[in-house]
Amino acid sequence: MIEITSDPQVVFDTVCEHALRQNKRCVDDSGCCLYRHRGMKCFAGALIPNDRYHIGMENKSWESLAERGIVSYVNITLIKKLQSIHDAEQPEKWVESLRELGKKFELNLDKLPAVE
């Protein structure tokens, strides 16, 4: 099982740093979101260590992966909400959406630039 840190701030910061660095959704040619594809990672995919990722994870929700014992349930609500930002929002909206989510979870927003 892939253990996810119990510290929601670390999960949030990891995803924020990844999102700002990549600044592009991880999708296949048909626009389907994937954990990994062509050197990119989705927000949840950024939490999976490279040596633990496998193609069989694709097309399964984070919750489904947890139910199968592949990832832990730790911070599952936060991770699912982060994943939905990646899947539903365009990159130019990410900072604003991540800030809103961080506030809801009472997290430090220092890894994000100010929204103009």
Image (cartoon, rainbow, N blue to C red):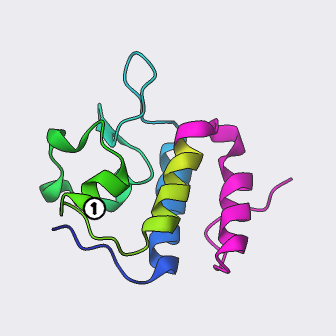
Which range is magenta?
87-116
Q: Position of residue 26 (x, y in %)?
A: 42, 35
**44 versus 101 height, above or below:** above
**Residue shown at 35%/79% (left/top)?**
5
Give the camera-side residue of 30 and 62: 62
Q: Could you tell me which residue is drawn at 54 percent across and 61 percent down?
A: 16
Answer above or below: position of 22 versus 44: above
Q: Pointer 1: residues within 10 angstroms few (<14), some, or many (20+)?
A: some
Q: Secondary structure at mark 1?
A: helix
Q: Horizontally, is 100 left or right of 84 in the view?
A: right
Q: Residue furthest top?
A: 30
Residue situated in front as seen by the camera: 110 or 34: 34
Residue at (36, 75) in percent of width and height: 74
Report the number of discs.
1
**Please, which residue is most extreme toward the front here?**
67
Residue 63 drawn in magenta? no
**Residue 2 versus residue 65: which sits nearer the camera?**
65
Image-based side of 67 in relation to 86, left or right: left
Expressed as whole percent of the image width and height from the top left, the position of residue 43 reads 45, 52
**Percent x, y of residue 40:** 36, 39
Residue 10 point in image, percent of width and height: 46, 77
The residue pinned by badge 1 equals 66
Please state, as top left, top right, bottom left or bottom right, where the N terminus lies in the image.
Answer: bottom left
Q: What amino acid is at disc 1?
A: Ala
Please tell me which residue is depicted at 17% across the width and 39% down the height of the picture.
55
Task: In the rendered view, tell whether residue 113 sits above or below residue 28.
Answer: below
Q: Is residue 114 above or below residue 30?
A: below
Residue 106 is a magenta residue: yes
